[in-house]
Image: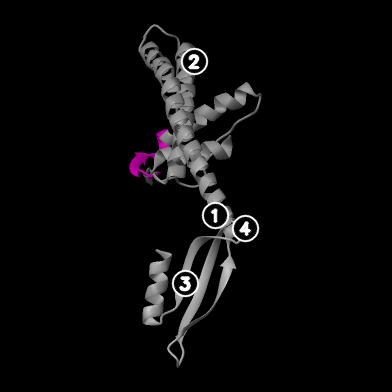
Amino acid sequence: MVLAKELESARNLQPFNHIFRQHTVNGELRWVHCRSMPEQKEDGSLWWDGVILDITAQKQIEEELIRAREVAEVANQAKSAFLANMSHELRTPLNAVLGFAQILSRDLTLTPQQQNQIQSIRRGGEYLLTLINDILDLAKIEAGRFELIPETWNTEGFFRELEQMFRIRAEQKGILFHCETVGQLPYTLHCDDKRLRQILINLLG
């Protein structure tokens, strides 16, 4: 291949610019970058003017970078598979907890205090489920497959749920939690409520 390019350059009197491997006089194999220009003299002889650069070190660095990238890609794929499997393993029992909490909440014989306790279980379970989904979202972001899903939803119920969630967590730590709106909130918003909830939870948490 190198010889063919050299012959073509000589035939057309065009610059020769090629990277190839070549054995040195002591038998060592090196990467070289050859750049030259053929020139035909009056007597018909062909002369070459140019330089040959030893780029073996550069090539070794490039090969190491390629290997490092391949290792990183394999590790990233293993991580994504682990996160997906872990999500499934955690989601299954958590859905069972949420399902039983929903069944218990339908019991008309429960006292208001018991109902509040069941709702606390439900909200806590949903929060854990959100955290699991966050882990999967991180994997999607790294893979460039993350998408927002905007919808129109009611703001009152949204902020009430967040307030109740953080009030319970604050009370457990002996912290007084107070939520107050400034101005008039719009009745509905059109955005990805799940992502907005994640942002507010991260800010308040």
**Residue that carries the numbered disc 4 in the rendered image:** 26
Amino acid type assigned to the residue bearing label 4 in the image: Asn
Q: CA distance from mark 2 to mark 4?
A: 82 Å
Q: Is residue 147 above or below residue 30?
A: above
**Residue that carries the numbered disc 3 in the rendered image:** 17
Neighbourhood count class around disc 2 (C-alpha, 10 Å): few under 14, some 14–19, many 20 upward = some
Give the magenta range.
Answer: 146-157
Question: Which is closer to the viewer, label 4 or label 3?
Answer: 4
- The numbered mark, 2 or 4, whose residue comes first in the sequence reads 4
Q: CA distance from mark 2 to mark 3?
A: 77 Å
Q: Are marks 2 and 4 in contact (CB under 8 Å)?
A: no
Amino acid type assigned to the residue bearing label 3 in the image: Asn
Q: Are marks 4 and 3 in contact (CB under 8 Å)?
A: no
- The numbered mark, 1 or 4, whose residue comes first in the sequence reads 4
Q: CA distance from mark 4 to mark 3?
A: 25 Å
Residue beneath the point at 42% across and 8% down:
110
Amino acid type assigned to the residue bearing label 2 in the image: Gln
**Residue that carries the numbered disc 1 in the rendered image:** 62
Q: CA distance from mark 1 to mark 3?
A: 20 Å
Q: Relative to 82, is 148 on the left or the right?
A: left
Q: Pinpoint residue 140: horizontal percent, then vertical percent.
A: 42, 40
Q: Is residue 157 above or below residue 49?
A: above
**Residue that carries the numbered disc 2 in the rendered image:** 117
Residue beneath the point at 47% across and 38% down:
74
